[in-house]
């Protein structure tokens, strides 16, 4: 059989397809004969052709992997001996490689201690005096350990001294390479017992890598991965060596004689280190050395005659393969902004930036602007509150720079600022819009690459303007519609369609007059069938969804059914993940106002989305060798299917073993599709309610599977959808309160909440944890007491909030050196805010006495952030949270007693907040004091005189409209809570003189409830103030920002005035401006 087998294997290497097919058929037959295993062994040991020896080794590996259980113990022993013998005598590297992978699979089945000959061979070869033997021994060691790191754990303590010795062998780069790769493989499994040995090896690893770089840059780049593994290790191995590691990365990253890919690897390791160990980086004073090294990379000019990739004309702005050292330098600064306290970062970074802004060299100016741009996301509060006008001034200047690379960077920076520095940046509308419109007026002659950047800036800026876009609306829409109708350039059309979506987000119903021509243009693009129009078609779908959400039900609903049909037709005829994901957001947009149009198609819609979640399309496993051989081994079991026992079945589960896989890469479009499918399923389930019930379970199961997906955006979307499924089920139960619906809700909550709590504790990505906390909050807000049916739930959720506030979670660098400083990165503070927002929600969902012990633990953590040394954002958040907790206690059973017991602790903190220099902090403190009076009732009456004097002092000097509105609300809460304790003759006239409310329309609810109560309590006082009260009421009626309930309270009061005090009322109404007069008269005469 051996010779025949060798012949057949030789045929597989022929260039002729017919011959290959014939050989494959023969092999399939041969594989049904148990003698195939010894025959393959004989070929591996005896064939003269290395290619055939390698093929035989690969096939034997696949055979052994699937059928080990069927090989008798005696045959296994002889197989082990034959394979090792073949390995020892083999001289070709490719065959050694394949045989070592075969050994790795056998070890997986056998465990190392049941194959002593292998251990002996490893021991002898790796210590051999012959460098060639050492290389081959290390190759074998690497392969068997990479696929079995855990079974080898008992041998780590013996192996580490060996690695230490090998790393001294600097003239044998291949040995160094395999040694470092093996070290990477075991790092995740090392514990405290190996920590000191591991630590002592690190300096040698750095030296070895420097030598490996000279020998083979690709191998060096792969070996550098060891540092990423060490950084992620549970055990703190690298901390003593962080400074040396950073200096090594900086040296490689700054060396322009090395390849870009190696420099990128080194620089991305620095970004990874800052993300995982920012406290260590700061503690070891490495911030400055890193900035001093990466800043020159960021501002370097490209080689003569070349441009930076983002400045090349064909750059479409979609970042594909844009990995170059300059890009990485910007990424490092971006990562610092997200993980380092802004005060620390700006102190070191601004001098470098300012020097470059005034430089003669355009690339230095560009670098400085790029630096400001990447700071915007992580340091948004710092820039907004401390330096917005100067930074914007700088960027506006760059937009008229003489050099285009600087202008492009300025547009990028403006886009970043518009996205992250809201709402303050929108206040500069008058300065920025003319600049941006200027760019668009020259659409036709400009270069497309540059126009793309102008559109990016414009879109981000417009999207958040809201009604302030009105003065520019006609110019903008004329520009966009003309681009759609008159330009031939598809890219410009696509940009204009996208911009219309951004304009719609701001303009909402103001866009209605332009709706017909926009829809006319979009229809043409949506029904196209040509490939080159595909991305314009996708963008048109995207903008259509935005229009569905913004122009209003009356305008869009006539098109809803047609839109759903369009989506279904597109997914049936075109296989494109980007197009599919845009149909998902179209369906969810339609579900908001026209759920009935989706209902008939839910089967088709959910089927496509669930397939997208299940699909492995776009996920490429990089296999280490040609997988044609797998075909030979896939169905050789058909004859004896019955024999397959359960073990065998489990073994066959993963056809592509991690062992064969050198890595995974996922195409972005497929990730985006999974993310959008989760988002859409959650939203559609909520909006279609009972109609979605038949699909809820299957959708939930598939989304739940995504909670461990490697890509964080998909995990984030999956957790969001799980929360929405709970809210959807709650809504169904509320609308139809059957026992079955209630049980379904409780069952769902029993799965989802423990999963959320566990994720907050263990998930490494902050963004995902924030999103899970947000989901927990939404579920508590909707489902209230149902969440806490399980008696242990209150404790679990309270403790999770507490531990986020104490920074104990994995994603907070938890367990790393304690952070004793007040300063922290803004995103870390934001994470704590998401947790803090849960406290008032829990307080309003459970009886106050059961929450009180947990609240006692949580309050000090919130109150600690009210100190004047904290940032404005922290003070505002903590005082706002205290106010919301008190507001929740107003209506919680037993809330009055709990609020009363807390009043002594909270009163001084809130009074101090009223005197703060920041209006938002004052606003939240005033609101909190009003809520305290309302929640604690009679217990705080003795503090009324002091509170009134604080408010009276504030009123004389306060200029911020929102603070004054909240002051009115707080006074009303005091009166409502204890009218006898307030000197009404002084307080009420002062209160009424500040009506109508200017900004905080929600407080109208409190104000009018109070005025109605006062009219019954002290009618004479109210009648004396009738004129200003009537004027204030006229502002509330018909105001879309005031809820119906409040408007009704005001109308009722006016009717009582008209009935009981006709003359005074008529006089008050007559003195109103005509428009107000008409509104009021109409409201009062309506029944």
Image: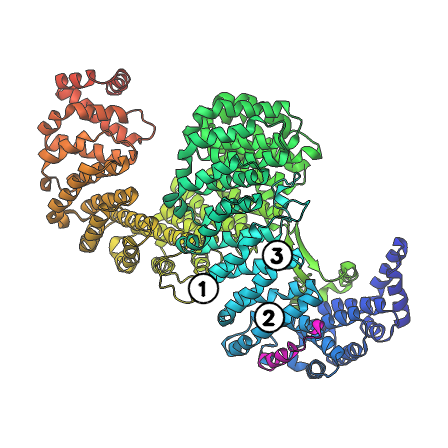
Q: Nearer the viewer, residue 120 or 375?
A: 375
Mark 3 Cα-neighbour bin, 10 Å: few <14, some 14–19, many ≥20:
many
Task: Please indicate whether residue 461 sits to the left or right of residue 80 in the image.
Answer: left
Residue 439 percent location from the top left of the image: 55, 30
Residue 892 percent location from the top left of the image: 25, 48
Could you tell me which residue is drawn at 54 percent across and 26 percent down? 559
Q: Nearer the viewer, mark 1 or mark 2?
A: 1
Q: Tell me if residue 161 is in the magenta stretch.
A: yes
Q: Tell me if residue 169 is in the magenta stretch.
A: yes
Residue that badge 3 annotates: 264
Q: Are marks 3 and 1 in contact (CB under 8 Å)?
A: no
Q: Nearer the viewer, residue 960 or 1084?
A: 960
Residue that badge 2 annotates: 206
Secondary structure beneath disc 2? helix
Secondary structure beneath disc 1? loop
Q: CA distance from mark 3 to mark 1?
A: 23 Å
Quarter of the picture containing the C terminus is top left
């Amino acid at each position: 059989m051996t010779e025949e087998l060798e012949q057949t294997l030789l045929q597989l290497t022929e260039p002729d397809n017919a011959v290959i097919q014939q050989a494959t058929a023969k092999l399939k037959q041969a594989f049904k004969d148990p003698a195939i295993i010894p025959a393959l062994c004989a070929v591996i040991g005896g064939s003269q052709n290395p290619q055939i020896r390698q093929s035989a080794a690969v096939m034997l590996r696949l055979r052994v992997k699937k059928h080990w259980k069927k090989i008798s113990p005696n045959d296994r022993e002889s197989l082990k001996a034959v394979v090792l013998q073949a390995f020892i005598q083999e001289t070709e590297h490719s065959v050694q490689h394949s045989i070592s992978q075969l050994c790795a699979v056998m070890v997986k089945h056998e465990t190392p201690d049941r194959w002593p000959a292998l251990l002996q061979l490893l021991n002898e070869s790796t210590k051999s005096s012959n460098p060639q033997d050492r290389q081959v021994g290390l190759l074998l060691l690497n392969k068997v350990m990479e696929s079995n790191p855990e079974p080898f754990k008992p041998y780590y303590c013996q192996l580490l001294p060996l690695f230490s010795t090998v790393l001294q062998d600097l003239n044998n780069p291949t040995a160094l390479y395999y040694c470092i790769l093996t070290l990477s493989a075991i790092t995740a499994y090392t514990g405290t017992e190996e920590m000191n040995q591991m630590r002592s090896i690190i300096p040698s690893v750095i030296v070895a890598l420097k030598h490996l770089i000279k020998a083979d840059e690709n191998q060096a780049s792969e070996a550098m991965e060891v540092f990423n593994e060490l950084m992620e290790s549970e055990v703190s191995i690298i901390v003593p060596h962080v400074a040396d590691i950073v200096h090594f990365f900086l040296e490689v990253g700054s060396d322009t004689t090395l390849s870009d890919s190696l420099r990128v690897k080194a620089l991305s390791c620095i970004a990874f280190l800052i993300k995982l160990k920012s406290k260590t980086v700061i503690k070891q004073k490495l911030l400055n050395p890193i900035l001093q090294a990466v800043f020159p990379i960021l501002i370097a000019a490209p080689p003569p005659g070349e441009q930076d990739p983002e400045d090349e004309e064909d750059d479409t702005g979609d970042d594909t393969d844009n990995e170059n050292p300059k890009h990485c330098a910007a990424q490092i600064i971006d990562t610092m902004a997200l993980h380092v306290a802004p005060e620390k970062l700006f102190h070191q970074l601004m001098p470098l930036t300012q020097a470059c802004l005034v430089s003669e060299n355009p690339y230095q100016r560009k670098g400085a602007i790029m630096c400001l741009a990447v700071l915007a996301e992580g340091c948004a509060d710092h820039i907004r509150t401390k330096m917005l006008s100067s930074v914007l001034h700088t960027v506006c200047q760059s937009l008229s720079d003489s050099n285009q690379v600087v202008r492009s960077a300025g547009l990028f920076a403006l886009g970043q600022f518009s996205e992250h520095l809201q709402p303050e940046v929108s206040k500069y509308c008058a300065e920025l819009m003319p600049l941006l419109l200027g760019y668009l007026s020259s659409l036709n002659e400009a270069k497309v690459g540059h126009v793309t950047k102008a559109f990016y800036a414009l879109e981000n800026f417009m999207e958040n303007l809201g009604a302030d876009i009105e003065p520019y609306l006609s110019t903008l829409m004329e520009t966009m519609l003309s681009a759609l109708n008159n330009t031939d350039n598809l890219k410009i059309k696509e940009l204009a369609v996208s911009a219309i979506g951004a304009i719609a987000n701001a303009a909402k119903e103001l866009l209605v007059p332009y709706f017909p021509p926009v829809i006319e243009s979009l229809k043409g693009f949506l029904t196209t069938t040509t490939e080159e129009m595909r991305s314009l078609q996708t963008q048109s779908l995207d903008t259509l969804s935005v229009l569905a959400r913004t122009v209003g039900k009356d305008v869009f609903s006539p098109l809803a059914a047609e839109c759903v049909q369009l989506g279904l037709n597109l997914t049936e005829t075109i296989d494109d993940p980007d197009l599919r994901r845009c149909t998902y957001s179209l369906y969810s947009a339609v579900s908001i106002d026209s759920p009935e149009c989706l209902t008939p198609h839910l089967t088709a819609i959910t089927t496509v989305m669930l397939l997208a979640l299940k699909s492995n399309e776009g996920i490429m496993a990089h296999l280490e060798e040609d997988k044609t051989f797998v075909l030979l081994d896939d169905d050789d079991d058909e004859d004896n299917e019955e024999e397959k026992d359960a073990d065998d079945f489990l073994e066959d589960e993963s056809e592509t073993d991690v062992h064969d896989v050198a890595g995974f890469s996922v195409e972005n479009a497929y990730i985006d599709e999974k993310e959008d499918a989760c988002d859409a399923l959650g939203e559609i389930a909520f909006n279609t309610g009972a109609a979605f019930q038949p699909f809820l379970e299957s959708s939930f199961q598939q989304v739940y599977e995504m909670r461990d997906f490697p890509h964080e955006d998909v995990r984030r979307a999956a957790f969001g959808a799980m929360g929405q499924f709970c809210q959807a089920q709650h809504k169904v139960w509320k609308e139809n309160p059957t026992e079955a619906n209630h049980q379904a809700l409780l069952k769902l909550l029993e799965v989802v909440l423990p999963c959320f709590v566990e994720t907050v504790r263990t998930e490494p990505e902050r963004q995902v944890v924030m999103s899970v906390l947000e989901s927990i909050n939404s579920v508590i807000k909707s489902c209230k007491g149902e969440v806490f049916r399980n008696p242990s739930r209150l404790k679990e959720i309270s403790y999770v909030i507490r531990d986020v506030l104490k920074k104990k979670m994995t994603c907070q660098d938890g367990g790393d050196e304690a952070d004793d400083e007040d300063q922290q990165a803004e995103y870390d503070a934001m994470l704590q805010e998401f947790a803090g927002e849960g406290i008032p929600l829990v307080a309003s969902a459970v009886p106050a006495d059961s929450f009180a012990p947990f609240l006692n633990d949580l309050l000090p953590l919130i109150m600690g952030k009210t100190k004047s040394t904290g940032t404005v954002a922290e003070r505002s958040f903590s005082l706002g949270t205290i106010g919301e907790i008190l507001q929740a206690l107003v209506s919680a059973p037993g809330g009055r007693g709990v609020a009363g017991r807390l009043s002594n602790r909270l009163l001084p903190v809130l009074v101090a907040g009223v005197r703060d220099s920041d209006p938002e902090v004052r606003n939240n403190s005033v609101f909190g004091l009003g809520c305290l009076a309302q929640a604690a009732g009679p217990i705080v009456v003795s503090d009324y005189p002091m509170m009134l004097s604080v408010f009276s002092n504030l009123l004389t000097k306060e200029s911020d409209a929102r603070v004054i509105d909240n002051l009115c609300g707080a006074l009303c809460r005091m009166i409502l809570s204890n009218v006898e304790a307030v000197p009404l003759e002084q307080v009420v006239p002062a209160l009424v003189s500040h009506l109508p409310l200017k900004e905080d329309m929600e407080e109208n609810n409190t104000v009018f409830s109070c005025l109605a109560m006062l009219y019954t309590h002290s009618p004479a006082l109210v009648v004396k103030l009738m004129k200003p009260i009537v004027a204030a009421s006229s502002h509330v009626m018909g105001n879309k920002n005031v809820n119906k309930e409040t408007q009704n309270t005001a109308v009722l009061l006016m009717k009582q005035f008209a009935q009981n005090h006709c003359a005074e009322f008529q006089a008050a109404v007559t003195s109103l401006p005509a428009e107000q007069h008409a509104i009021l008269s109409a409201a009062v005469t309506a029944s």
